[in-house]
Amino acid sequence: MPEALEGLLPIAVAALLVGAAFVISRAVVPFIGWRRGAIRFRSEPIPDAWRDIVARNVPVARSLSDEERERLLRLAQVFVHDKPFEGCGGLEITEEMRVTIAAHACLLLLHLEGPCYPTVRRILVYPSAFVPKIALPVHYMGVVPPPTLEAGEAWRNGVVVLSWDNVQRGAANPADGDDVVLHEFAHALDHEDGDARGTPVFESPSLVRSWAGVLSARFKQLRQDVDEGRSTVLDAYGAKNPAEFFAVATETFFEKPEQLKDSEPDLYDQLRQFYHQDPASRGSRPGTG
């Protein structure tokens, strides 16, 4: 072997090892978070008023077992204690707002291991749909698009923004597949691996691989359905990108589980494995007659 090639060989091998390590780390990152330990519940009793708030404002919880409802309240108690709420646009945050939002958000965590949304730092709540604040680069010379009212946002820095009107609207019809809290906190789960690609933290590499395959196929199908004007159980907003697909699929999984299971059984099964819940097996949905 020429001396020049002999000198390059160790460098090439090192580069291959670094590349392999990077690939392995990206495969491991989505399930490392499951090793962070179990949630630590509060010791104080659940206020009686909270049970009434959840019964009134979180109708999906009516289909839970007694044990699941108690766990949901315990999770909400941790959420309310750990996550500061801030009213925006003159809104004064009430106990009902905190508990309603916390219980909806914690429905996703009901059977998940690990802490309560460790990357979420605070919750901003507007009275109604809001105009998002967009920071443009100093030398930005493009055309700024007109403002669009938003019902909610989840920022990668750990801030979740919600419209209280939309929170109430989503809770009022628990079978329409439209719930802003479920949507934005699905994004929060997606952000836990430091990225937003529609791939939250999974328990094992095999689940990461199977989810990636289903995500790719169903996202592509949804985009085709939207482009060709076909109706689908998933909201068309999920065709925007994989992150929105995961959030929309989560809303549908909890609010329209029977329809999702019938029309997209592989997607339903992946979400069932991730959330460790089977909402289609809980009987008739509240508010559907």
Image: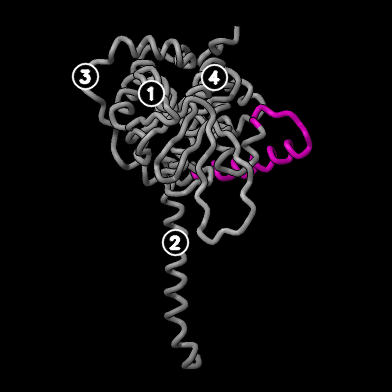
Disc with the residue nearer the chain's start (2 vs 3): 2
Residue at point 50%, 37% (across, down): 153
Quarter assignment of residue 53? top left
Residue sticking out furthest to the top:
289
Query: Which badge, 3 or 4, comes first in the chain's sequence?
Result: 3
Choose mark 3 or mark 4, whichever is in front.
Answer: 4
Query: In the image shown, does 53 or 75 lie closer to the viewer?
Result: 53
Helix, strand or loop for the magenta stretch, by majority: helix
Please, which residue is most extreme toward the front here?
90
Question: In the depicted view, which residue is nearer to us: 249 or 101?
Answer: 101
Q: Residue at x 21, y 22 (%)?
A: 43
Q: Residues within 10 Å of mark 3 (few under 14, many from 20)?
A: few
In space, the residues marked 2 and 4 are separated at their CA atoms by 44 Å
Quick check: 38 above or below 285? below
* Callout 1 amino acid: Glu
Q: Amino acid at mark 2?
A: Phe
Q: Earlier in the sequence, mark 3 or mark 1?
A: 3
Q: Which residues are magenta?
A: 208-235
Foreground mark, 4 or 1, reads 1
Kindly identify which numbered label has been placed on residue 92: 1
Q: Are marks 4 and 1 in contact (CB under 8 Å)?
A: no
Q: Between 102 and 22, which is closer to the camera in this rendering?
A: 102
Q: Which mark is residue 44?
A: 3
Q: CA distance from mark 3 to mark 4?
A: 31 Å
Residue 22 - label? 2
